[in-house]
Amino acid sequence: MTTIAAVRKIPRQSLKVRFGSTLLWRLDQAFEKAEDPLTPWRPPTVYRAARILAEPISTVSSVEYVLRDVLRELCTRLEKNHLGSRCMDLACYRVDGTVDRCEVRTSKPNRSISHLMRLFSGRLERLWADFGFEAFILSGAEVEALPPAQLSLSPSDAAGDEESYDLLIDRLGMKLGFQEVTHIRIRESYLPEQAVEFRPAATSSSAGTEWPAYRVRPLRLIDPPMRIQVSILIPGGSPVQFFIGHQKHQVLRSEGPERLTAEWWRESGSRWGTRDYYRIEDDNGFRFWIFCDPSEQWFLHGHFA
């Protein structure tokens, strides 16, 4: 059975029992016996708050007062709809009709009035009032879902630590640029030099990516790996001693080998090819991560804590 016409010759009840009613619906769509439901496009809701003043203002404290008022209105609307904004833009209209703007961004959707006020406070002084501002419009852009947070009675809960981390990222991002503030993200790779990468802290990390418990790696890698001299008892056996420069290390414990090969499905291949890794401990209690390449040359790739 290689064509849709051949499927049509099978009794519909038999198809429904084996594949469900979805197949019958798709067949009817293909032969114009069923209509496709249409979902009309609707423009996204605009989240905006405005204030028109009876008298123009020009001081920073006065602008802060108005900003807090419009922030309270806008954040209340966002909270009601379980949303948050990554970008808040304050448009300040002068008496002569010109406009000056002040914008803040956050790494995650946010609707905290106190936090947004702290971010705005360092930028309001840059506004040029001239003869004064008479109107303000605060707009929330990049609106995303932000469900309510579960409060905890514990003063040292993980949610509070995560919130403090997000606030720090926002403050650093506003000063340095969010692309300059990075964090380490785990990649699904067996190769140690490709197992992690630096990503902007404002980007969301992959929810399903976790470090496997069985994959023991040193906290610090040597890049590029350092060439060392290793002594072994038999060919292909575990090392018994090695030299880092002129310093000799006697091996007391050794675990391995763990063989790693190049990942052919990645565009950026590894120049090492096949590597046999050993976790070793010397006579002074220091632990190292060394490997042997196909040419039987040894390298030091990392130190364990």
Image (cartoon, grey):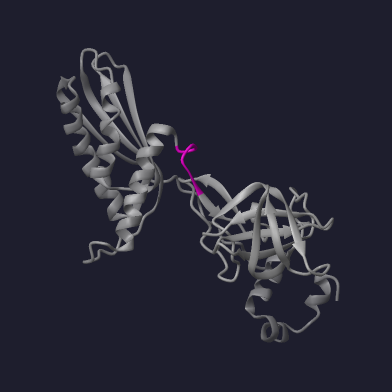
The quadrant holding residue 101 is: top left
Locate the N terminus by quadrant: bottom right
Residue interval drawn in magenta: 178-183
Q: Residue furthest left?
A: 55
Give the camera-side residue of 200 and 296: 296
Residue at x 81%, y 68% (from the top left corner): 236
Q: Is residue 121 left or right of residue 17?
A: left
**Residue 76: x, y in percent?**
24, 49
Residue 260 highlighted magenta (yes or no): no
Up/down of 8 relative to 43, above or below:
below
| Residue 15 visible in the picture | yes
Up/down of 162 relative to 88, above or below:
below
Q: Is residue 159 left or right of residue 72?
A: right
Give the camera-side residue of 100 and 251: 251
The quadrant holding residue 187 is: bottom right
Residue at x 20%, y 31% (from the top left corner): 64
**Residue 278: x, y in percent?**
68, 65
Give the camera-side residue of 203 and 187: 187
Q: Is residue 58 left or right of residue 99?
A: left
**Residue 258: x, y in percent?**
71, 67
Residue at x 70%, y 58% (from the top left corner): 242
Q: Is residue 161 left or right of residue 17?
A: left
Q: Main secondary structure of the magenta part?
A: loop
Residue 182 highlighted magenta (yes or no): yes
Up/down of 254 relative to 201, above or below:
below
Label count reads 0
Residue at x 33%, y 62% (from the top left corner): 158
The quadrant holding residue 217 is: bottom right
